Amino acid sequence: MALKRKPAPQSVYRRQLATRLRELREASGLTLTEVSKQIEVNQGSLSRIETGERGTTPVLVRALLDCYAVTDTELRDDILDLVRADKEQQKPWWRKYSTVLTPTRYDGYLALEAGAVGLANYQPLLVPGLLQTEDYARAVIAQMRPELTSDQVDTLVKVRMERQESSRSGEHSTDLWAVLDEAVLHRVIGSPAVMRQQFAHLVQAGEQPNVTIQLLPFSLGAHPGLYGPFVILTFPQPTGPLVWLENPNNSVYLESESDIQNYTDIFDQLRASALNPAETRTHLTRTAEELEP
């Protein structure tokens, strides 16, 4: 399956705005060329606004709404609110870490995650970032990114911890459903002490109402998740879901309906085959006790 490579959208609000502006233009019967001539704005810029590749301003959006004969005050206010919300999200908490994040597009993922209401995460080898302890995260980052200095590793650990706090804060916490392969428990990251602490953290996290953790036992044998890790992100309507695939140098996202359905089907099969949350907590506790001191 070919991966769809393109820059990640900057915010869920921009994706919503792009969709609504395109729908309003199409409802008006105007083409981009006609709109470009009427409001005297470059057609390419209008096209990028409609695809979510660039943001816009309240002044330009008001001109577009006038062009589309949108007079409903409530609708106009809703759309202008999306413009302002997108502008506000261009000042994210992770901006101060951009020199470390930007090269791998991790900042693009953080922007998506910040706007998500639900995350379905499958991990065959590692504890998901939102569930990692600080010591586990430091060991993972240091080993997976050997080119980084100790200061850069510390920076990425801070990002991971702030990311966890961000997902729990705000008006609504993000729903996380994580399915882990049993291999995650047997690959010692850092040390046995780090792993015991990590298992205890998973047990505690799994008791939170917005977190579900399940384990795929070795006894299952082959399963659809053997292709590798993925995250399905869902957003407030009308924005559609995305699948995020993380790679060392060029992470990508998928947004076609067929790709979303394929990964959703895989995740549904995985969670149906996995131990239930209570069995998973028992298995985590038992594995922690069996670790060498």
Image (cartoon, rainbow, N blue to C red):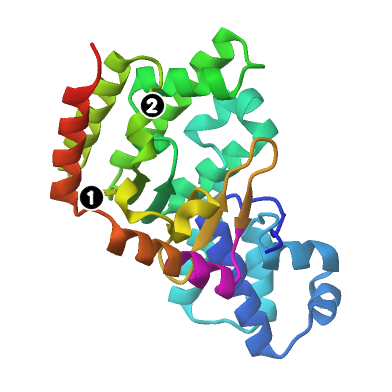
The residue that label 2 is drawn on is 161
Query: Residue 153 placed where, x, y %?
Result: 54, 16
Of callouts 1 and 2, the N-terminal one: 2
Crowding at mark 2 (Cα within 10 Å: few <14, some 14-19, many 20+):
some
Q: Secondary structure at mark 1?
A: loop
Please give the name of the residue rendered at 33% of the width and 41% of the height, measured from the top-left corner: 182
Query: Residue 143 placed where, x, y %?
Result: 54, 19
Horizontal side of residue 167 vs 260, given as left or right: left
Asked if 169 appears above or below 159 in the picture, the reply is below
The magenta region covers 254-264
The residue that label 1 is drawn on is 210
Query: Residue 52 placed where, x, y %?
Result: 65, 60
Residue 257: say if magenta: yes
Image quadrant holding the N terminus, namely bottom right
Q: Secondary structure at mark 2?
A: helix
Amino acid type, mark 1: Asn
Horizontal side of residue 211 vs 103, given as left or right: left
